[in-house]
Amino acid sequence: ETRRAQVLALNHLPDPAERDAALQRWAAEEFPGEHEVAWFELSGAASASLFVHVLLALAADPASTEDDVAAATRAYWPWISLATTMLDSYVDQAEDAANRDHSYVAHYPSEELALRRIKECIARAAHGARGLRNGPRHAVIFACMIAMYLSKDSARTPAMRASTRELARAGGTLTMVLLPILRLWRIYYRQRAA
């Protein structure tokens, strides 16, 4: 998974056509065959290093079993990893467009489809997190991540406010409770755009 996460470097190729072709090639080589996720979702999920940390935590826990690793793989790959990448891309849309940086969300054919797909990823990720051993811990971390992304100033612009609310609701009650708390944290610590 650490090797796969290196795909993140391809996101920074300056030419958009070259970048997309390289990411598409990488996804086809790394994950041949049919998938329920698109090529850009595969590369996006792989670029998130979160799953690596989960595997390290499982490796350090003497009580971990092969079943724990398999369950974590099903939850984190691709759903939790994909949800966090898409949330990051969602909140950075305007900045990415202004800087001509890569945007995973921009690969969706419409804003409506992007929103629907991100909500699906969040729902599947939250369900997977709850089903793990120590599921509440995984679920809290995931809810915190959703709230942290969605508390960013860019997610609260008039153009994004309604869709941000929908994404927060997809994260569940804990996300909804955490969102205003993290918003205040960002204001207090001057992290509104970070």
Image (cartoon, helix red, strand yellow):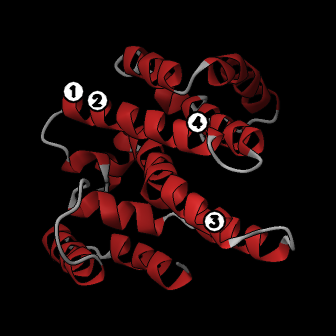
Residue 77 position, x and y percent, is 47, 60
Write down the residue under mark 4: 146
Identified by mark 2, the residue type is: Arg
Q: Which mark is residue 112?
A: 1
Write down the residue under mark 3: 67
Mark 3 and mark 4: span between their CA atoms? 27 Å
In-front residue for pair 161/113? 113
Image quarter where the C terminus lies is top right
Asked if marks 2 and 1 touch (Cβ < 8 Å), the reply is yes
Q: Is residue 175 above or below residue 146?
A: above
Asked if marks 1 and 4 touch (Cβ < 8 Å), the reply is no
Q: Is residue 1 above or below residue 117?
A: below
Earlier along the polypeptide chain: callout 3 or callout 4? 3
Identified by mark 3, the residue type is: Asp
Write down the residue under mark 2: 116
In-front residue for pair 142/69? 69
Report helix, strand or loop for mark 3.
helix
Mark 1 and mark 4: span between their CA atoms? 19 Å
Asked if marks 4 and 2 touch (Cβ < 8 Å), the reply is no
- On screen, residue 111 versus residue 13, left or right, reads left
Report helix, strand or loop for mark 2.
helix
